[in-house]
Image (cartoon, rainbow, N blue to C red):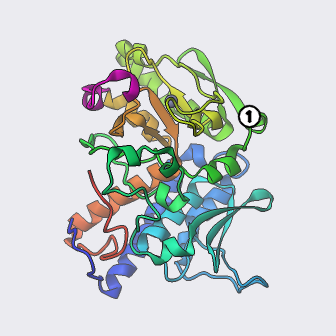
């Protein structure tokens, strides 16, 4: 893919992009039964299908001067922002609308809750300024400073996650999905242990009971169904699938911020075999390349990212982040479309999608 910047594709290329996004989003909604299941399934399907209305669906301004969008996009946004918002809405049916105000773009969730997607300053700084993303040119120490790991939703989705069979040799600090918007997590799952506990469900995984948030539990049950055939064929894999826990209200090891386990969206598997980078003392772990791909794919296909793809690896860790997997799949298909058509502008030319950094 051409990495040049500042080149804008002709209008028909943008139309092709939107058409491709629409088709792919509809396909994706069908591919993620766990994300669209449950009482909000219709809303998720509507969100994914909202792409058919194109990016110009914008409701009249309200009294506060905000524009609310019934569709998945807003005028004037980069291709990457439109893609992010489509993926967020398809992944989380709790998102009822997207609003643009003078201070930035907000997601409106059930129950009158609002979460910032990006500030106006972030959106104005194209494509992704240091203010929006942990400074990619800075050293590892700064990258792992917890103050830089709680970011806007927009920044949390920027580093591309590459689904299996891709196992990129990631540079220091490269960890797609390890940056999170804690405001979004708290709005989705709860800001304290008691609230998170109310949304937990028990799910059986490889003979053990795991507690996760309802949406993640449904996705984990779907992973379990996928793995049933795999472990029947290859029983030796069961040793890699021993749950060491889902929900635990605790900080990230070695940090002060809350672990995603605190929100019931992560599960650790067989930690004796699959270590965390702080315990392992190896900068690159061989398992980052050799960990079984059938396991990783079963999780990725249901909306989980794997911590083995982070430079600061967490090989036991699978985390329910359907927006990141959705974006990864869409970009994969758009890149395939680019390759098939020979058009390099499908991903947005000088826009942020095109500027995304591959390890
Ligand atoms: Zn974990």
Verify whether residue 288 appears in magenta. Answer: yes
Please give the range of residues in magenta.
Answer: 275-291
Please state the horizontal and vertical placement of residue 279, each as a whole percent of the image. Answer: 39, 22
- Which residue is rendered at x = 76% and y = 58% of the image? 110
Q: Quadrant of residue 109?
A: bottom right
Up the image or down, 91 lies above or below 38; here it is below
Q: Position of residue 319 (x, y in %)?
A: 51, 37
Residue 185 falls left or right of residue 145: right
Q: Which residue is mark 1?
A: 193
Residue 235 lies in quadrant = top left
* Picture quadrant of residue 308: top left
Magenta stretch holds residue 355: no
* Residue drawn at x 49%, y 48% as measured from the top left: 149
* Camera-nearest residue between 33 and 324: 324
Residue 221, image x and y in percent?
A: 58, 30
Frontmost residue, 106 versus 141: 141
Mark 1 neighbour class, 10 Å CA radius: few under 14, some 14 to 19, many 20 or more? some
Instruction: Report the residue at 57% width, 70% height from top.
Output: 119
Q: Position of residue 314 (x, y in %)?
A: 41, 31
């Amino acid at each position: 893919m051409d990495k040049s910047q500042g080149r804008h594709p002709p209008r028909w290329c943008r139309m092709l992009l939107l058409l491709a996004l629409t088709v792919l989003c509809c396909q994706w909604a069908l591919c993620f039964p766990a994300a669209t299941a449950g009482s909000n399934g219709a809303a998720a399907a509507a969100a994914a299908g909202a792409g058919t209305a194109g990016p110009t669906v914008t409701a009249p301004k309200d009294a506060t001067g905000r524009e609310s969008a019934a569709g998945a996009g807003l005028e004037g946004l980069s291709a990457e922002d439109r893609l992010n918002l489509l993926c967020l809405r398809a992944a989380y049916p709790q998102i009822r609308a997207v609003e643009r105000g003078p201070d930035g773009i907000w997601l409106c969730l059930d129950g009158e809750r609002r979460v910032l997607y990006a500030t106006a300053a972030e959106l104005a700084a194209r494509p992704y300024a240091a203010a929006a993303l942990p400074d990619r040119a800075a050293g590892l120490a700064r990258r792992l400073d917890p103050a830089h790991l709680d970011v806007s939703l927009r920044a949390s989705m920027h580093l591309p996650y590459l689904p299996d069979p891709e196992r990129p040799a990631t540079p220091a600090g490269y960890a797609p999905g390890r940056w999170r918007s804690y405001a979004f997590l708290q709005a989705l799952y709860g800001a304290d242990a008691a609230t998170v506990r109310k949304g937990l469900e028990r799910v059986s995984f490889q003979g053990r009971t795991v507690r996760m948030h309802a949406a993640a539990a449904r996705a984990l049950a779907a992973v379990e169904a996928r793995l049933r055939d795999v472990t029947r064929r290859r029983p030796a894999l069961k040793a890699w699938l021993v749950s060491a826990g889902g929900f635990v209200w605790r900080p990230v090891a070695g940090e002060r911020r809350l672990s995603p386990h605190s929100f019931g969206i992560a599960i650790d598997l067989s930690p004796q075999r699959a270590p965390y980078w702080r315990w392992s003392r190896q900068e690159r772990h061989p398992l980052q390349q050799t960990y079984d791909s059938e396991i990783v794919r079963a999780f990725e296909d249901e909306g989980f990212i794997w911590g083995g793809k982070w430079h600061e690896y967490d090989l036991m860790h699978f985390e329910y982040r359907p927006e990141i997997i959705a974006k990864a799949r869409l970009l994969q298909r758009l890149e395939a479309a680019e390759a098939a058509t020979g058009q390099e502008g499908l991903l947005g030319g000088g826009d942020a999608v095109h500027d995304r950094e591959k390890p």
